[in-house]
């Protein structure tokens, strides 16, 4: 199979979909790998390393899109890349389609076989391609939140850990999944007072065993969410429904009741965000202030630490990519329900139920009916 990897063009996105080691694995498996010139530089990988791994370097992204059977990326294609789609192309990347109808329309029109990292689900229910970025985003959320609590950014001027004789900052985490757990780990480590909410009592029990008396766990009800957010210095939104739009549990009405200069970090913004007042921001302009509350809603948070993020992501994606390359997407899906769970569009049809349910214009088609 001909496999390509191009430079990411999203704002301040320095990750790359394939490391030189990944390229070597594909080449050793008998595939041809094409890398856009300079694609890995943002993550610290030189063109010469890809060449040594057996990859072919091409100057123009278009030439790679035109010739490959499978494109391996990090982030969703942007509108300027839509004309480069071709019938039968396998696109292997993060898509987050529930929050992006324009991209979904383009994938369907181009009859792209789109395999989304964020919906590929293992037999135990885990999301192995989303997990590494969720871990990083969760940890970054506290790092970024702590920074924007500084007065010069509009924050209230609070140190997370405080010092002897002063109160610790109150960090509220909405959602106890991978993002929330990793945010909790860093917040506790930095000495903050932490409250974490989740809809699952079983998950709250696990978090209680994990962190003990260092945290307060609460069932995620409308009342508990409101009370916690009003008392918070920093709120982390880490709610996830795989493939679907995120429920808006951080209400706009909270803003006027919160502390002036409190910070809200919406890690769920890729899937539409869990805040009614959330809108996508970039690393160039990461924050805005609404009703006195600082909002950080960067859509590609792990792109801020591309070296770590690229290695963590590609460690996870390589296994499934090799399965698809070795067998073709159709055979790989027939052999593995795990691979099939990642397919969001196929032959002009929506094959992920949560994505289809996010729009009135589309109906879900079972992938098995198409392959």
Image: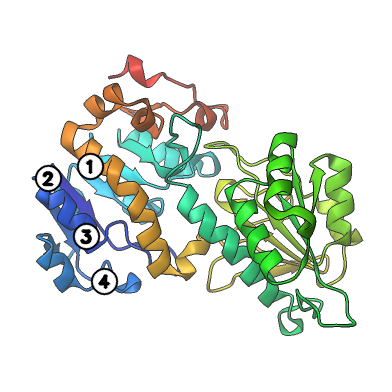
x and y, in percent, of residue 190 in the image:
69, 72
| First in residue order: circle 4 vs circle 2 | 2
Local SS, label 2? loop
* Mark 1 closeness class: few <14, some 14–19, many ≥20 residues within 10 Å: some
Q: Report, in whole angstroms, how far the alpha carbon at label 4 lies from the one at label 1.
A: 21 Å
Instruction: Say whether marks 1 and 2 touch (CB < 8 Å).
Output: yes
Residue 199 occupies quadrant: top right
Q: Earlier in the sequence, mark 3 or mark 4?
A: 3
Q: Tell me if residue 166 comes above or below residue 197 in the rendering.
A: below
Q: CA distance from mark 3 to mark 1?
A: 13 Å
> Could you tell me how far apart the alpha carbons at marks 3 and 2 are, in whole angstroms?
12 Å
Residue topped by disc 1: 322
Report whether residue 200 is seen: no
Residue 325 x/y as whole percent = 19, 39
Q: Which mark is residue 29?
A: 2
| Residue 239 locus on image (x, y percent) | 65, 45
Identify residue for label 4: 45
User: Based on the displayed image, in which of its 4 quarters is residue 247 positioned?
Assistant: top right
């Amino acid at each position: 199979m001909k496999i390509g990897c191009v430079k990411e063009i999203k704002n301040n996105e320095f990750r790359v979909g394939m490391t030189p080691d990944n390229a070597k694995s594909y080449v050793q498996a008998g595939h041809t790998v094409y890398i856009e010139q300079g694609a890995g530089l943002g993550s610290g990988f030189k063109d010469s390393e890809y060449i040594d791994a057996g990859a072919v370097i091409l100057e123009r992204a278009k030439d790679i899109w035109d010739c490959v059977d499978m494109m391996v990326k990090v982030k969703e294609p942007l509108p300027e890349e839509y004309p480069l789609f071709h019938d039968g192309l396998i696109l292997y990347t993060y898509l987050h389609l529930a929050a992006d109808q324009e991209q979904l329309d383009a994938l369907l029109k181009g009859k792209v076989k789109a395999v989304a990292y964020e919906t590929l689900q293992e037999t135990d229910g885990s999301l192995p391609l989303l997990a590494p970025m969720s871990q990083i985003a969760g940890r970054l959320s506290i790092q970024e939140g702590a920074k924007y609590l500084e007065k010069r950014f509009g924050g209230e001027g609070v140190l997370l850990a405080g010092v002897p004789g002063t109160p610790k900052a109150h960090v509220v985490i909405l959602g106890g999944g991978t993002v929330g757990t990793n945010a909790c780990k860093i917040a506790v480590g930095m000495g903050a007072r932490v409250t974490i909410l989740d809809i699952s009592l079983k998950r709250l029990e696990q978090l209680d065993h994990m962190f003990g008396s260092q945290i307060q766990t609460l069932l995620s009800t409308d009342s508990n969410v409101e009370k916690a957010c009003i008392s918070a210095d920093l709120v982390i939104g880490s709610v996830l429904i795989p493939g679907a739009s995120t429920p808006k549990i951080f209400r706009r009405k909270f803003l006027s009741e919160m502390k002036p200069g409190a910070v809200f970090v919406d890690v769920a913004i890729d899937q539409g965000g869990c805040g009614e007042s959330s809108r996508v921001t970039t690393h160039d302009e990461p924050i805005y202030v609404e009703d006195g509350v600082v909002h950080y809603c960067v859509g590609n948070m792990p792109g801020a630490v591309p070296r770590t993020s690229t290695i963590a992501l590609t460690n996870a994606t390589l296994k499934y990519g090799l399965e698809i390359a070795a067998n073709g997407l159709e055979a790989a899906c027939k052999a593995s329900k795990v691979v099939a769970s990642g397919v969001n569009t196929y032959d002009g049809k929506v094959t992920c139920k949560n994505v289809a349910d996010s729009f009135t214009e589309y109906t879900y088609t079972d992938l098995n009916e198409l392959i």
